[in-house]
Image (cartoon, rainbow, N blue to C red):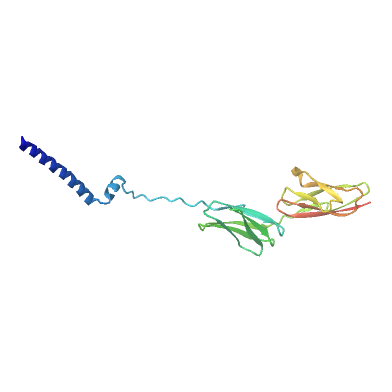
Amino acid sequence: MFFIRQYLGLGALCLALAVVLSGCEGEKNDPTGSEEYFKKNPYSSDERTDPLPTELDISPVIASIGIIGQEVVFTASGGSGSYHWSLSSEDNGAVSSRGANQCVYKCKKVGNNDVIVTDDGGQYAAAHITPATDTMTVTPASAALSGSSRYVSFTVTGGTPPYSWTSGNASLGTISYSASTSYTAGYTAASGAYGQNTISVRDAEGRIATASVTQSN
């Protein structure tokens, strides 16, 4: 009986020693655990697809300018990072940033120009500025009011609606018009006011046309 116990005890000891040695052998062959990691996470040869940067755009892409001092706002969208503005001709205009994605172009000389926006990724977009050739005309070009005649109607042709009308000297008379039919306006002379007044009309792109009113008793 003693011999059997001794034999069983020796067998258990050998089994335990074999387990320990097996564990040590595994650690020796894969000390960092990398083999086990790649066994659970096999390598894939598929290429990664990196997202492409969003295309850079500018709006509007074309604008017409007919007078010195006229301003146009351009807006950039897409791209990556910050926006940077420049011009193809600084003789014809100047550009200044406004906010994170806009710039203001101001006309120095009526003529062709390009507003260029670039982003931090090297993409660029451009808008073209053309000189306005559509002239405006006010009819009648001049009007004479006297006696009880204190009202005259004006009509503008050409240009780009809507239009806005102003009286150069409000003490001589006032002008009124409707937003829906802004191509016509009515001038009413002030009672007892005499002299010459200038009526101006401005279109949506900044062009201006004028007419004169002479008031006498």
Q: Is residue 131 left or right of residue 20?
A: right
> In the figure, is residue 193 to the left or right of 110?
right
Farthest residue, direction top: 1
Pick the quarter of the image with the N terminus: top left
Q: Compared to 47, does 90 lie above or below?
A: below
The image position of residue 28, as x and y in percent, is 22, 51
Residue at the spot 76% in from the left edge and 50% down from the top edge:
157
Residue 16: % across, % down = 16, 42
Residue at 13% from the left image edge and 40% from the top image edge? 12
Q: Which quarter of the picture shows residue 198?
A: bottom right
Q: Nearer the viewer, residue 215 or 6?
A: 6
Q: Residue at x 89, y 47 (%)?
A: 150
The one nearer the camera, 132 or 188, is 188
Give the farthest residue toward the bottom.
91
Instruction: Indicate the position of residue 56 as horizontal and vertical percent values.
Output: 54, 53
Provide residue 98's location: percent of width, then percent of height.
62, 55
